[in-house]
Amino acid sequence: MADKKARLTVDGLDEAIELPVYSGSEGPDVIDVRPLTGNGLFTYDPGFVSTAACESKITYIDGAKGVLLHGGYPIEQLAEKSDYLEVCYLLLNGELPTDEEKDKFVSTIKNHTMVHEQMSHFFNGFRRDAHPMSIMVACVGALSAFYHDSLDINDAHHREVCAYRLIAKMPTLAAMCYKYSIGMPFQYPRNDLNYAENFLHMMFGNPCEEYVPNPILAKAMDKIFLLHADHEQNASTSTVRLAGSSGANPFACIASGVAALWGPAHGGANEAVLTMLEEIGDESNIEEFVAKAKDPNDPFRLMGFGHRVYRNFDPRAKVMKATCDQVLTELGVEDEPLLKIAKRLEQIALEDEYFVARKLYPNVDFYSGIILKAIGIPTSMFTVIFALSRTIGWISHWSEFHSSPNKIGRPRQLYTGPSRRDYSK
């Protein structure tokens, strides 16, 4: 039921068009523009930045106030008191689990971490220097060739099983991408380790000796997973929803999310941070690059500062900064050249009036890039880890879409090409 109504007057129409106005539990009111179609009109909104394409109960963002809520819970509280798998449960079910529910959920995820043994043969078809994201897109889509027993998108149990499998298997596939690129054997997952520990084991362990995950690094890894779990209707999540609207199987839909995330304007931000640090090269060059960033006529930009959505501050960044400091202290790598450049840039951004006035604060990508670099994860794997983290958001939105009546997505366009003309050649 509409809370209010809006009236739109259009030249050439005898009567104003009445449009329902709905109010959500948070955020601005939404004008229902569907009645426009019956009057021969569409809205024009490039990038859909002013359009609510769906109704969702999963995540809410208020960019002006720096608010990120999952199921109503502030991200800062979840980062402090929860862990990644508990947040996965929250995103999937809308409520935090009881202790019993969490134990069962964690156990189920652990029992799905292995991938079909034939998946290992896929990797032999890729060049060793292939970008890990190209391999991830292929392998995630290929999961549908192995798990035929859970592809009925109209069956709630099938959707649940697919969600569990994707959450469990993405770290395994991600680690396989890394191991393949360096010519080392794949590491099987271990059910005695938690989610983050297991990922580090598969990344850095080898068959010759036992790998014991560093608890500080494992906790940092869990924080990175948690802080990237979902971010409302971003480009990749919208892609997953749109792909899902066609009735495509869940593995194909998540593969489409991986592909969208691969774009440098979306998931490549923390990778861009490291690329920028390498371009600066030395602390002695920092002032020169800061001056370039301030010059309106210079195309150079400092990566990892400010955020398109958050106009005040990124609520995830404060958590990530504390985690970053813990990791650097634990590893004793403060003297590593790129990390020294990063720490100096952080200081400038927090103190320099130019950055403070424009709210160009260090964001979550800035700190997560530094953490991943310090842990020893190569830059090419950064977006893969983002995809691993965001899988829960994608599959939660996909499942929500299929849990209620829906229709295939079909955006409209403003056509500006030639009018009808006859072929006269």
Image (cartoon, rainbow, N blue to C red):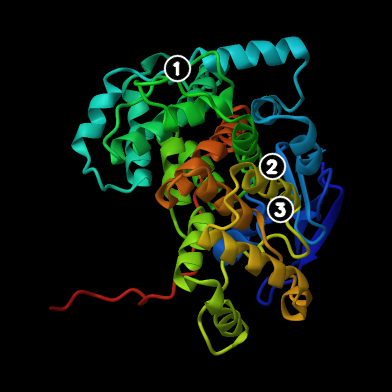
Q: Quadrant of the N terminus?
A: top right
Left/right of residue 39 with respect to residue 94 in the rendered view:
left
Number of the front mark, 1 or 2? 1
**Where residue 317 is drawn, which disc sits there?**
3
Displayed quadrant of residue 143: top left
The image position of residue 5, as x and y in percent, is: 83, 56
Q: Badge 1 is on which residue?
A: 150
Amino acid beneath label 2: Glu
Mark 1: secondary structure: helix
Q: Badge 2 is on which residue?
A: 55
Q: Residue at x 33, y 73 (%)?
A: 420
Mark 3: secondary structure: helix
Cα–Cα span, label 3 and label 2? 27 Å
Q: Does residue 220 appear in the picture of this structure?
A: yes
In front here: 411 or 35? 411
The image position of residue 107, as x and y in percent, is: 59, 12
Q: Quadrant of the C terminus?
A: bottom left
Q: Residue at x 47, y 70 (%)?
A: 281
Q: Does residue 246 appear in the picture of this structure?
A: no
